[in-house]
Amino acid sequence: MEDGELRRTLQSLACGKVRVLEKLPKGREIEDGDKFRINAEFNNRMNRIKINSIQMKETSKENKETHERVFQDRQYQVDAAIVRIMKARKSLEHNLLLAEVTKQMSSRFNPSPQQIKKRIESLIEREYLERSDADRKIYQYLA
């Protein structure tokens, strides 16, 4: 068992609402030298008890990594929505494409127009879309 997971489990058993274990010395935090023993005084009318596990706080590094992964996933979702729309319509004006992408993505999250524009530019660079020669506001899907 991983060290962090073991500490969290021991903390749940010794410091939670239901104290199945006794911790010496008493306190909330689990240290390397702490000793545990079964709580002989523990009794409960229920045959089964539920022990809630204590959640660890997310560090700032983990929080940053999580936000980066979410941002990356959202970029892929916006790209996919743009390609789906353009594949169906073949050609579409910029404002209509923005509205359609926002409508499709509204159930997941609300992308900003700047975010959508960046993704459109990325798809143009990767040659999924191109701007119309006649009107620069119109995008065309490239098969």
Image (cartoon, rainbow, N blue to C red):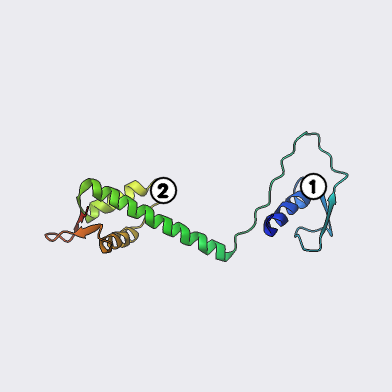
Residue depicted at x 81% and y 60%: 34
Is disc 1 placed on a helix, strand or loop? loop
Q: Quadrant of the N terminus?
A: bottom right
Label 2 CA crowd tier, 10 Å (few <14, some 14–19, many 20+): few
Give whichever of 20, 124 is nearer the camera. 124
Gap in Å between the C-alphas at discs 1 and 2?
A: 41 Å
In the image, farthest residue toward the right: 40
Q: Position of residue 53 (x, y in %)?
A: 68, 49
Foreground residue among 80 and 53: 80
Residue 71 figure quarter: bottom left
Mark 2 or mark 1, which is nearer the start of the sequence? 1
**Residue for point 40% across, 55% down:** 74
In the rendered structure, find residue 19 and report the number of the disc placed on it.
Answer: 1
**Identity, as a three-letter code, of the amino acid under mark 2:** Arg
Label 2, on which residue?
108
Residue 76 at what x, y percent from top left? 38, 55
